[in-house]
Amino acid sequence: MQPLLSTFSRRIARTPPPLFLAALYAALILAGALLLMLPVSRTIPLSWSDAIFTATSAVTVTGLVVFDIGSGLTLFGEIVLALLIQLGGLGLMTFAVLILGALGLPVGLTGQIYLREELNQNSMHQLMKLVKTILKVVLVCELAGALLLSASFIPHSGVLRGLWEALFHAISAFNNAGFSTFPDGLVPFATDPLVNLVIPALFMIGGIGYVVLHDIFSGKSPRLWSMHSKIMLLGTAILVPWSVGLFALLEWHNPGTLGQFDSVTARLIVSWFQGVTPRTAGFNTTDIGALHDSTAMLFISLMLIGGGPTSTAGGIKVTTFVVMLLATGAFFRRQSQIHAFGRSIALEEVLKVMALTAISVMLIFIAVFLLTMTHEGHFLDISFEVASAFGTAGLSRGFTGDLSGFGRAVIIVVMFLGRVGPLTLGFFLATRTTPRVRYPAGTIHLG
């Protein structure tokens, strides 16, 4: 028995970390689907397609659903869903390290390597400190969020049910999942001040990235924060007012969204919530299907950008988007070096950004193409759905329920790659190979 375990351990150690992590996520999805199929988990008949789609959406913290969660699942089923969201958002390796730490067991070198890959860190230095920061942030934010939300949900659903809904939405919000137990999402709470403050606070903290939070809570002066944190905070500070203001401008007189509210204050509150949501949270306080086409295109762009690295958010990430803009600006200014906040950005990092962006665009294009072949006449809805799946945002124009079996399979793959794909890409980009033969430079005409 011991030799078999030793051989198995060696094989795991030789497995590329991203492949191992992808396999863990796939195993969790299958386990979640099995649990959701149990009679104790559901109140309605579910097909394997329903269960796998829902489990994938939960583990990838997306939030797309093919049935009403509140009426289709029992309390046990909702607990299973919340655990899948927590595990998927926190990260399986991070969660495993937290459990081992609580039991006083060592993580080991192999575990630290896998954890480093999952948290997108270049070295193991201070890795365990970052994990402890993650634990503190998760516990404080989700418990505080649940406590605050209960003040709004208890009057709506009763004490016990309201407490559970508050905890469920706190977990869903912090992990940027966007799942809701209410049939219309958070539309009944569109103008509730508490919901409009707590839910965005949770998904913005969860989506900004643990590295940034570690810098903020370290007590260091902002001048000493890492360049990553500064770029992430600057990008967020620009994107939030841009998205909120543009949403208000585009939807102010739309009777299906903001136009239904007579009060200017109510319209501004809804604009705030719905403007900050698309970058991966997936909650809605208005009818997403009633958005103008221009607003839908705005949402698509925001969902593709996403949140921060080493966070519960998806998308290509804000830092990737900012570096891409900096590289473009440097090209037009004929600068050979890219810099920000007194630090230079290496050419290797720029190449990673370009590779990640190119692969993301190709994946999205292929998915849209495949869905348009089988769902004729719904191009905007399809593009919105694919962007939401890739960015693990969870917003939908009501098209998720109309997906065929093939369409569901495509969206499942996009959700999985949107969550796990960057890990695999990062592994291959980080693998250095020294060329044995050098070739003379050639000329190619571009543009």
Image (spheres, grey):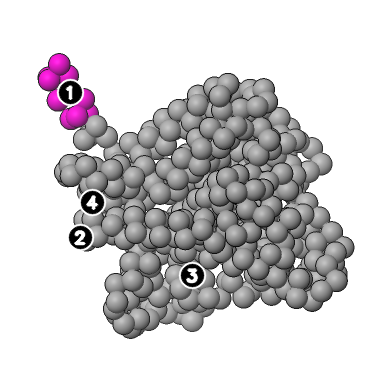
- The image shows residue 140, relative to residue 59, as above or below, that is below
In the figure, is residue 91 to the left or right of 199? left
- Distance, label 1 to label 3, CA atoms, is 46 Å
Question: In this figure, which residue is indicated by the disc labeled 1?
Answer: 5
Is mark 3 in CB contact (under 8 Å) with mark 4? no
Q: Which residue appears at 72% of the width and 65% of the height?
A: 191
Amino acid type, mark 2? His
Amino acid type, mark 3? Val
Task: Name the spot of residue 163 as percent of width and height, x first.
Answer: 56, 49
Question: In this figure, which residue is indicated by the disc labeled 4?
Answer: 434
- Distance, label 2 to label 3, CA atoms, is 26 Å
Q: Which residue appears at 28% of the width and 43% of the height?
A: 99
- Distance, label 3 to label 4, CA atoms, is 30 Å
Question: In this figure, which residue is indicated by the disc labeled 3?
Answer: 322
Which secondary structure lies at badge 4? loop
Which secondary structure lies at badge 2? loop
Choose between 289 and 140: the one closer to the eye: 140
Q: Is residue 255 magenta?
A: no
Q: Is residue 4 magenta?
A: yes
- The image shows residue 354, relative to residue 73, as above or below, that is below
